[in-house]
C-alpha cells in the first residue's frame, strides 16, 4: 500500500513513517501538504495544524479522493472542526504510539470504501426515483391526452424509446416538456 | 536517617524570545516562592533548589530541556511553560517518564493530562467574564485580532460563541499576526478597525506584539473610552512595556491583578518588592507560578516524596490562600479554582478592578456547563452590582 504522510519531520512523523513501513507500506513523508494529491497514493496521513497563514490545499475542504487519517496535537473544537472539514475517516493524537496506526489505517480504508459505496448507491437510487417520477408524470399525461390506460401509456413510452434509440426517461421528459408547451394558453384579453 | 539532600525541581521559563518578558516574571515568581519556603525551614528540613533551563521560547527546546531535567537531572516535578506549544512539547516527556508538570498559565482549555496541573485560567474563568462585561458595557460588534497560533484561534472561537449568542452580536473581522510581528503589521489592521468602528476589539495578541498593537491603536487616535481593546493576556508586564499613556483605558480579564485588595496579596507584594525590587511587574502568570510552588511544597510536606504517584494524592483537592483568593486543585480536572476579575488600566498605568467574583470558580475545561448566567461577576466601585 502506498501511503503519503504529510507531517513535519519530528518524533511523531518519524514514528509514523517507521511503523507504516513495518506493516508493509511504502511511505513518502513531506511537509507542508501538497496542493494536489498524486494519483499513485492509496492513503494519506495528514497532520492537522490550523494555520491561518498557510495556503490551504483544495482537497482539504471536504471530499478527498483517497482515505485520509488526521494526526492532531490538540483536541479543542478548532482542531476537531478542521479534522471534520478535512473529511478524515480516522484520527490519531500526538504523541503517537506505534500501536493504533494499523487499526486506524484499516478503519479509515473501510469507512472510506463503505462511504463511497453508499454514495454511489444513493446517487443511483435518487436517479431511479427521479426517473420513476418522470415516467409516472409522462404516463399520466398520455393517459389524459390519448385516453389510454397506465400500462398502455408505459408501452407507448417504451416503444418510442426503442425506435428513437434513447431512454424511457428521455421520452418521458420530452412528453412532459411537450405537454407544458402545448398546454400553455396565452393570456386572453378581457 | 533523615534525608538532608536538597529537593531539586525543574524550572522552564524563557529569558529571550517573543514571550520572555512574562515568562521571566514567572521565573521570579517561582524563585520567590522557593525563597519563602526555604526561609521557613524548607520541606521537612530539606532545601528546595531550582534547576532552571532557558528554552528561548522555542517549543523544541522545551521538549529537549524537559528531557534533560528528567533523564540527566532526575527531576520529578517541573514548573514551567507559557505558550500552549511549549506545554504540548513537554507533555509527552512527563507522561512517558511519569513526572509532573505544573503549568501556571492561562490557556485555551480542552485538555487533561494525568501528569499536568493547570494553575492558570481556562476559558470559563476569563473569556466568559470578559464577554459578559464587554457586551454589557460596550456592545456586541467585535473586531478580533490575535497572534497566529492555536491559543488565539481557539480563544477567538470561544469568544465568538459568547458574542454571537447575544442578539445583535457580530464578528466584524478576524485578523492574525505572526508571533514575531513588526510594527507595520498592525498599521493596516488598526486602519481597518478605524473604518469598521467595532464596539470593542478582542485581542489575543501575545508577547512583544502586544505593545505594537496598542501603540498602533494610540497612533491612530482611537479612544479606549469608546472602543477599548479587551484582552485575556495583556497584564502588568505588557503595560509596563508599552507605557501608561498607551495602556490607559484598555481592559483585561484575569484572576489576578496587583490591585487585588487582600492582606495576603499586600503582604506578598511587599515581600516580593523587598527581595526583587522592580525587576518584574507581578501579574496573573507570576501569581500562578508563585502559588503553585507553595501548593507543591505543602503536598510534599505531607507525602514525604516528590514522586508523582505519592505526591499527587496530596496535591489534588488541596487548597491554598493565594494572593487572588483561596484556590483549590480539582482532583477530576487537574485544574484550579480561581477568582475571575476584570481590570481596566487607569491613567497611572495601573489596573483597577472593575468587576470581580467573590466566589471561586472551578475550571470547566471542556465547557460542559455552557450557560452564560452561571458565571456571575460582582462589579466593584461606585456601588455597581452585576446581574
Image (cartoon, coloured by chain):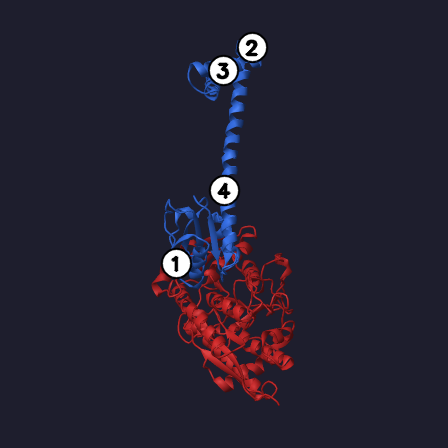
What kind of element bears circle 1?
Answer: helix
Which chain is tinted blue? A
Residue A164's place in the image compared with B373, above or below, is above
Q: CA distance from mark 3 to mark 4?
A: 38 Å
Give residue B248's position: percent from left, percent from top: 46, 70
Q: Are marks 2 and 4 on the same chain?
A: yes
Give the quadrant of the C terminus of chain B: bottom right
What kind of element bears circle 3?
Answer: helix
Chain B: drawing colour: red
| Left or right: B194 in relation to B342 | left
Residue B363's place in the image compared with A30, above or below, is below
Residue matched to label 2: A148
Residue matched to label 4: A113
Q: Is residue B147 visible?
A: no
Q: Is residue A97 visible?
A: yes
Q: Residue at x 62, y 56 (%)?
A: B371
Q: Are marks 2 and 4 in contact (CB under 8 Å)?
A: no
Q: Are marks 2 and 3 in contact (CB under 8 Å)?
A: no
Q: Are marks 1 and 3 in contact (CB under 8 Å)?
A: no
- Closer to the eye: label 1 or 3: 3
Q: CA distance from mark 2 to mark 1?
A: 73 Å
Give the quadrant of the N terminus of chain B: bottom right
A187 or B36: nearer the viewer: B36
B242 or A143: nearer the viewer: A143
Query: Chain under label 4?
Result: A
Label 3 or label 4, whichever comes before in sequence order: 4
Q: Residue at x 54, y 60 (%)?
A: B134
Residue matched to label 1: B189
Q: Tell which residue pokes out farthest to the bottom in this image.
A: B1
Amino acid at each position: 500500500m502506498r501511503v503519503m504522510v504529510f507531517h513535519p519531520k519530528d518524533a511523531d512523523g518519524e514514528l509514523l513513517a517507521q511503523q507504516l513501513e513495518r506493516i508493509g507500506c511504502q511511505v513518502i513523508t513531506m511537509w507542508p501538504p501538497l496542493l494536489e494529491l498524486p494519483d499513485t497514493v492509496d492513503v494519506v496521513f495528514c497532520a492537522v495544524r490550523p494555520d491561518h497563514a498557510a495556503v490551504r490545499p483544495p482537497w482539504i475542504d471536504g471530499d478527498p479522493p483517497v482515505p485520509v487519517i488526521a494526526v492532531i496535537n490538540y483536541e479543542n473544537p478548532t482542531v476537531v472542526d478542521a479534522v471534520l472539514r478535512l473529511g478524515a475517516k480516522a484520527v490519531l493524537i500526538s504523541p503517537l504510539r506505534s500501536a493504533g496506526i494499523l487499526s486506524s489505517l484499516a478503519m479509515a480504508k473501510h469507512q472510506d470504501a463503505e462511504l463511497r459505496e453508499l454514495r454511489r448507491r444513493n446517487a443511483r437510487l435518487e436517479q431511479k426515483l427521479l426517473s420513476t417520477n418522470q415516467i409516472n408524470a409522462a404516463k399520466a399525461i398520455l393517459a389524459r391526452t390519448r385516453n389510454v390506460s397506465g400500462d398502455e401509456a408505459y408501452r407507448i413510452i417504451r416503444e418510442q424509446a426503442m425506435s428513437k434509440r434513447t431512454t424511457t426517461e428521455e421520452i418521458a421528459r420530452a412528453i412532459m416538456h411537450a405537454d407544458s408547451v402545448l398546454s400553455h394558453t396565452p393570456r386572453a384579453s378581457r | 536517617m533523615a534525608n538532608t539532600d536538597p529537593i531539586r525541581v525543574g524550572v522552564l521559563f524563557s529569558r529571550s524570545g517573543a514571550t520572555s518578558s512574562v515568562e521571566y516574571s514567572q521565573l521570579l515568581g517561582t524563585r520567590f516562592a522557593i525563597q519563602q519556603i526555604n526561609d521557613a525551614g524548607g520541606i521537612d528540613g530539606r532545601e528546595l533548589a531550582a534547576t532552571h533551563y532557558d528554552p528561548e521560547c522555542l517549543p523544541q527546546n522545551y521538549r529537549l530541556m524537559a528531557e534533560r531535567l528528567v533523564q540527566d537531572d532526575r527531576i520529578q516535578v517541573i514548573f514551567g511553560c507559557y505558550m500552549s506549544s511549549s506545554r504540548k512539547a513537554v507533555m509527552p516527556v512527563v507522561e512517558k517518564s511519569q513526572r509532573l508538570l505544573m503549568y501556571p498559565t492561562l490557556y485555551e482549555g480542552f485538555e487533561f493530562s494525568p501528569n499536568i496541573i493547570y494553575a492558570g485560567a481556562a476559558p470559563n474563568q476569563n473569556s466568559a467574564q470578559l464577554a459578559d462585561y464587554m457586551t454589557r458595557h460596550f456592545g456586541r460588534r467585535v473586531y478580533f485580532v490575535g497572534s497566529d497560533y492555536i491559543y488565539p484561534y481557539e480563544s477567538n472561537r470561544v469568544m465568538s460563541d459568547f458574542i454571537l449568542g447575544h442578539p445583535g452580536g457580530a464578528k466584524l473581522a478576524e485578523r492574525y499576526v505572526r508571533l514575531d510581528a513588526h510594527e507595520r503589521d498592525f498599521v493596516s489592521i488598526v486602519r481597518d478597525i478605524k473604518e469598521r468602528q467595532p464596539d470593542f476589539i478582542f485581542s489575543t495578541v501575545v508577547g512583544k506584539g502586544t505593545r505594537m498593537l496598542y501603540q498602533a491603536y494610540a497612533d491612530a487616535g482611537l479612544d479606549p473610552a469608546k472602543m477599548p481593546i479587551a484582552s485575556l493576556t495583556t497584564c502588568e508586564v505588557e503595560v509596563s512595556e508599552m507605557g501608561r499613556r498607551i495602556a490607559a483605558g484598555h481592559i483585561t480579564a484575569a484572576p489576578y491583578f496587583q490591585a487585588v485588595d487582600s492582606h495576603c496579596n499586600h503582604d506578598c507584594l511587599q515581600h516580593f518588592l523587598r527581595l526583587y525590587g522592580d525587576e518584574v511587574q507581578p501579574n496573573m502568570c507570576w501569581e500562578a507560578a508563585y502559588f503553585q510552588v507553595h501548593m507543591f511544597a505543602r503536598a510534599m510536606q505531607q507525602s514525604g516524596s516528590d514522586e508523582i504517584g505519592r505526591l499527587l494524592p496530596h496535591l489534588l483537592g488541596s487548597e491554598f490562600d493565594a494572593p487572588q483568593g483561596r484556590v483549590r486543585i480539582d482532583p477530576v480536572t487537574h485544574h484550579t479554582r480561581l477568582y475571575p476579575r476584570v481590570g481596566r488600566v487607569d491613567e497611572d498605568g495601573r489596573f483597577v478592578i472593575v468587576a470581580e467574583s467573590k466566589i471561586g470558580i472551578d475550571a470547566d475545561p471542556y465547557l460542559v456547563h455552557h450557560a452564560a448566567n452561571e458565571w456571575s461577576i460582582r462589579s466593584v466601585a461606585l456601588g455597581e452590582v452585576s446581574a
